[in-house]
Amino acid sequence: MLDIKLIREKPELVRKNLEKRQSKKYLELFDNLLIVDKKMLFLLKETEELRHKRNTITSEVKKLLTEKKDATEKIKQAKEIPLQIKEKDQKLTELKQEHNSILFKLPNLLHKSVPFGKDDSENKEIKKEGKIQKQDFDLIHHGKLAADLNGADFERAVKISGSGFYFLKGDLALLEQALIRFATDLLTKKNYELIFPPLLMRRKPYSGVTDLNDFENVMYKIENEDLYLIATSEHPLVSMYMDETLNEKNLPLKFAGVSPCFRKEVGKHGLDERGLFRVHQFNKVEQVIFCRPEESEKLHEELLKNSEKLMQSLKIPYIVVNVCTGDIGVVASKKYDVEGYSPREKKYIEVMSCSNCTDFQSRRLNIKYYSGKEKVFVHTLNNTMIATARALRLILENFQTKKHTVKIPKALRPYLNGLKELKLKK
């Protein structure tokens, strides 16, 4: 949520920033907010003046009665004012609800370093790492290979759960666990606290951490319950300090959240979107930080380096892109995407998103800290450390051999009792 004080003091600055998102919807919302805010402030002023008038007349009535003078007219006025105040308070409540509703629909202000662009084709590549290995054989689709390795069963998952689900089995299941352990070890060694969050959240905290107007269509809701299955552990981790004031001495707070994630994943359905790529349930290790405003840019880079360290350790080629104004989404002020190389598609695919959300989420969730005697909203940041389903796809493609076995990255072998290769089951 944006700072209403900033909007009132510098409306043109805010509007100019919103223009970068190239959405008429946001500009119309902003213009409507200014109108509603003006009405609300005017009504507040009128209500306060009426209260002041009521207090003044009450004092005058007391004085007249003490002096045994006629107070009939003043008493009549005093009786009318509460009705006027009640009427204005009702209108004020309606305006405040409308005001708050609009504020919750507006996106975060973009950092000055976010490149201008219409969609993901205009994201700016800022780094390329890793050597792409030449493969002189036809790659088997990762989903088919996973099944051939007896590591996944898609057909039986479809039978009981529908498309977008899978059974993970045997060594491939162990490989996923190795990815989780490796990712969490990298983070806990850097003093990120490991957390397994609740997998269900109520609407109020969920609407604070993200824009449900855009996000609700990809979420699973529990029927007849005020509960949603989480789409990422970022959401419960950021929400857990809702309506709290943190101790500045404890900042920054750094967490590594591990959880299943549930998404409807509405969108593409081509061959390479199947298998382990666009699924309704997957496991993920997420990084979340709460910090002072002046620290967030530096910690944003730290989150990115953590994910890069993982990709480098796995020996998977990747690029980092600075996500452009037309692709960044509502919550982030600045976002990097890490994209791993898919040798089958011969292109880079998104595997990690690293966002600096500034004070956007903390304003919606009312999370502050004491800076001296003043309460200040914290900044929140998040980054995927690893989404295991997508990582498994990249491993199945990048380490596939002519014999259609899969070499296990050396960094993961200690977690697999020295297992070096996934082999076809005879």
Image (cartoon, helix red, strand yellow):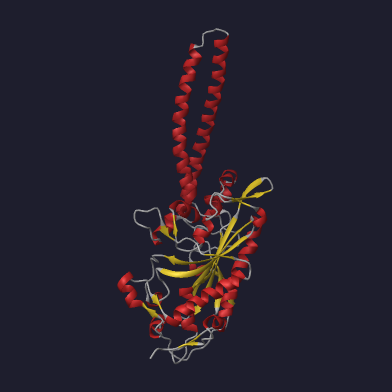
- Give the farthest residue toward the front: 417
- Pick whichever, 368 or 170, lies toward us: 170
Residue 201 vertical position relative to residue 122 in the rendered view, above or below: above
The count of marks equals 0
Q: Is residue 228 visible?
A: yes
Residue 411 vertical position relative to residue 336 in the rendered view, above or below: below
Q: Which of the 4 image quadrants contains residue 267?
A: bottom left
Residue 406 vertical position relative to residue 62 in the rendered view, above or below: below
Q: Which of the 4 image quadrants contains residue 312?
A: bottom right
Tell me the residue at 45%/61% (across/down).
Answer: 199
- Pick whichever, 188 or 394, lies toward us: 188
Q: Position of residue 368 (x, y in %)?
A: 60, 50
Residue 314 vertical position relative to residue 235 in the rendered view, above or below: below
Where does the C terminus fall, quadrant-wise?
A: bottom left
Q: Position of residue 178 (x, y in %)?
A: 52, 77
- Give the farthest residue toward the left: 159
- Pick whichever, 101 or 420, lies toward us: 420
- Pick whichever, 372 or 302, lies toward us: 372
Q: Which of the 4 image quadrants contains residue 141?
A: bottom left
Q: Is residue 127 visible?
A: no
Tell me the residue at 48%/56% (across/down).
Answer: 210
- Give the farthest residue toward the right: 372
Tell me the residue at 46%/21% (across/down).
Answer: 80
Does 225 sit left or right of 5 as displayed? left
Tell me the residue at 57%/63% (across/down).
Answer: 255
- Give the farthest residue toward the top: 68
Q: Position of residue 187 (x, y in %)?
A: 59, 70
Q: Position of residue 310 (x, y in %)?
A: 57, 75
